[in-house]
Amino acid sequence: MSDAALRNELCRVGRSLHARGYVHGTTGNISARVDGGFLITATDACLGELEPEALVRVDAAGMPVDPAERPSKTLALHRRIYAATSEAGCVIHTHSTHLVRASLAVAADEARDDLLPPITPYFVMKVGHLPLIAYRRPGAPEVGAEVAAAIVQASARGAPIRAVMLSRLGPNVWHETPAAAMAVLEECEETARLWLACEPKPAPLSPAQIDELRRQFGARW
């Protein structure tokens, strides 16, 4: 994808997420891997009003090519994700309502291997495990190391992940393309919505059902 096409695609995804309420105000950010570095939304950018020329290009060390531009303060976290998994061509962070609500329901802000149980086949197939990262202030440097560790540990278990949930803040998701990353986010948020709406809570898919999804569709669980 050319630089111009990628910039347009990132703007399309940002506007779509904003229009559907996945982000509000100037929350959320999007980045993409490019030759020699990354494209990322600027500090305090509104995803619903992105313009291609306003996306910030940074080099591999995270320095803006144009010193006058200010990349999102979560750039450091995005770079840790890109370094930890070659599958990440695009990273999206939002404050999606139902995922944040689900994280608020976890006592003591503890880290967990899974924020949500595997209640639907598409959550298992499209997302996989969704680790919950214990609460840290926005931009805390420890978060990058904790997210990178979760990615490495999941890969070592043979079940690579495509998303993590930052407690009380929101999800970070990634995939090869912006459209694919957006699909991961959508599946995460919809599963959280279903989980919160169900009373009593549904039983998770059985080990046999999950194993079938692995065999038939290559699910990573």
Image (tube, rainbow, N blue to C red):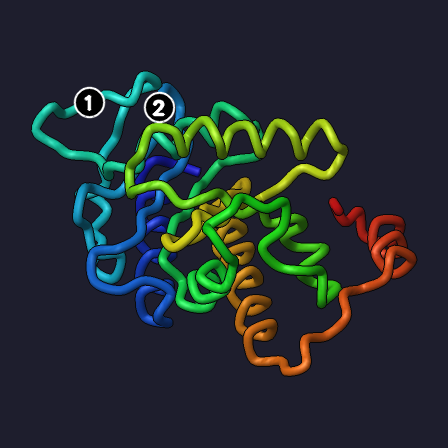
Q: Amino acid at mark 2?
A: Gly
Residue at (68% x, 75% y) in the render: 201
Quarter of the view holding residue 32: top left
Dot 1 lies on which element? loop
Q: Which mark is residue 37?
A: 2
Position of residue 175 measured from the top left corner of the image (x, y, whole percent): 54, 43
Identify which residue, 215 or 202, lies in the foreground: 202
CB within 8 Å, label 2 to label 1: yes
Quarter of the view holding residue 57: top left
In the image: residue 97, left or right of residue 201: left
Label 2 environment density (alpha carbons within 10 Å; few <14, some 14–19, many ≥20): some
**Label 2 – label 1 distance at C-alpha:** 10 Å
Residue at (38% x, 29% y) in the render: 142
Residue at (20% x, 25% y) in the render: 64
Label 1 environment density (alpha carbons within 10 Å; few <14, some 14–19, many ≥20): few
In the image: residue 185, left or right of residue 142: right
Position of residue 204 measured from the top left corner of the image (x, y, whole percent): 76, 65
* Residue placed under numbered mark 1 in the picture: 65
Identify which residue, 150 or 121, lies in the foreground: 150
Quarter of the view holding residue 91: top left
Q: Which mark is residue 209?
A: none
In the image: residue 153, left or right of residue 5: right
Dot 2 lies on which element? strand
